[in-house]
Image (tube, rainbow, N blue to C red):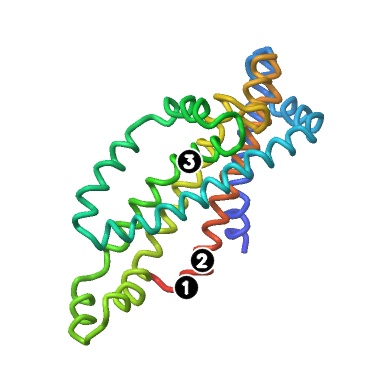
Amino acid sequence: MISRFIDRAATPLIYLALLIGWELITDVLKIPTWILPAPLEIYHSAVKWAPELASNTLVTLRETVLGFVLAIALSLPLAIIISLNPLARRIIYPILLGLQSVPKVAVAPLIILWFGLSEWPKILVVVLVCFFPILVNMVAGFEAAPKTMLDLMRSLGASPHMVFRRLRVPVALPHFFTGCKVAVTFAVIGAVISEFVAAQDGLGYLILTSTAQSQTPLAFAAIALLTVLSIALFHGIEFIERRVIDWTP
C-alpha cells in the first residue's frame, strides 16, 4: 500500500521539486523577469491573461485537430494503394519522401503567400507535418501481415477484400495508432510554425507578440498551454487506442 502510494506520488513530487528549484534559482540569482520568469510570475500572468490565453488556445486546437484529421483522411487511402500496388509504391513513395525532406519551416511562408491569411493555410501546414508519419506507419502495418497467415487465407479461398479486412487491417491498427501518436505532437508544432509566419490569433501568435513586448511570463504561459495541449491530444489517442484494440498484437 505504501509502496503504491510512493510510486504514484513520485512523479508529481519530482515535478514540484523542479518548480521549487526553478523559483529559488530565479530569486537567489535575481534573474530579470524578461529573461527567465519564475513559475509564480508565469502563473500570475496566466491568471491575468486567462481570457486571451483561452481564446487563442481554441484557435490553435482547432487548427491542430482539423489538420490532423485531414492528414488521416489523406494518408489512409494512399497507404492502402502503396501497400497493395508495387508499381504505385515505386512511383509515389520517392515523391512523398522528397516532399517530407523539405523543411516545413521553409514551406510555411510560401503556403501563406499562396493561400492568404485565413485559417486554412495554417491547417494545410499541419496536414503536411502529420501526413508522412501516419502514412509510413500504415504502410508498414499493412505489410506486416504474416506470410503464413496470408497463404493460409488464400489457400482457403479468401478473396483479396476479405484478406485485407480480416488480416491486414487488424495487423495494421497498432501501427496506425503509433503513427497518430507521433503525428499529433508534430501537429501542434505545425500549427505554431504557421502562426509564427502570419497570423492574428493562436498561441504561436501570442508567443510572438508577447516576446516582442518583453512579456516573457505570458510567453511561458502560452508555451505551457501548448505542452498541455500536446500531451492531452497524445493521451486522447492512447485512450481511443485502448478502446479499439482490445487484443495484444
Left or right of residue 117, residue 33 in this image: right
The circle on residue 242 is 2
Marks 1 and 3: in contact by CB < 8 Å? no
The circle on residue 186 is 3
Q: In the image, which is nearer the foreground, mark 3 or mark 1?
A: 3
Q: Residue lying farthest bottom?
A: 156
Residue sitting at x 45%, y 44% = 130
Q: Earlier in the sequence, mark 3 or mark 1?
A: 3
Residue 141: image location, x then y, percent:
32, 61
- Mark 1–mark 2 distance (CA, rounded to whole Å): 6 Å
Amino acid at dot 3: Phe
Q: Looking at the rendering, in which quadrant would you find the C terminus?
A: bottom left
Few, some or many residues within 10 Å of mark 1 (<14, 14–19, 20+): few
Marks 2 and 1: in contact by CB < 8 Å? yes
- Mark 3–mark 1 distance (CA, rounded to whole Å): 27 Å
Few, some or many residues within 10 Å of mark 2 (<14, 14–19, 20+): few
Amino acid at dot 2: Arg
Left or right of residue 167, residue 125 in this image: right
Q: Secondary structure at mark 2?
A: helix
Left or right of residue 209, residue 179 in this image: left
Residue sitting at x 44%, y 40% = 129
Residue 75: image location, x then y, percent:
40, 53
The circle on residue 246 is 1
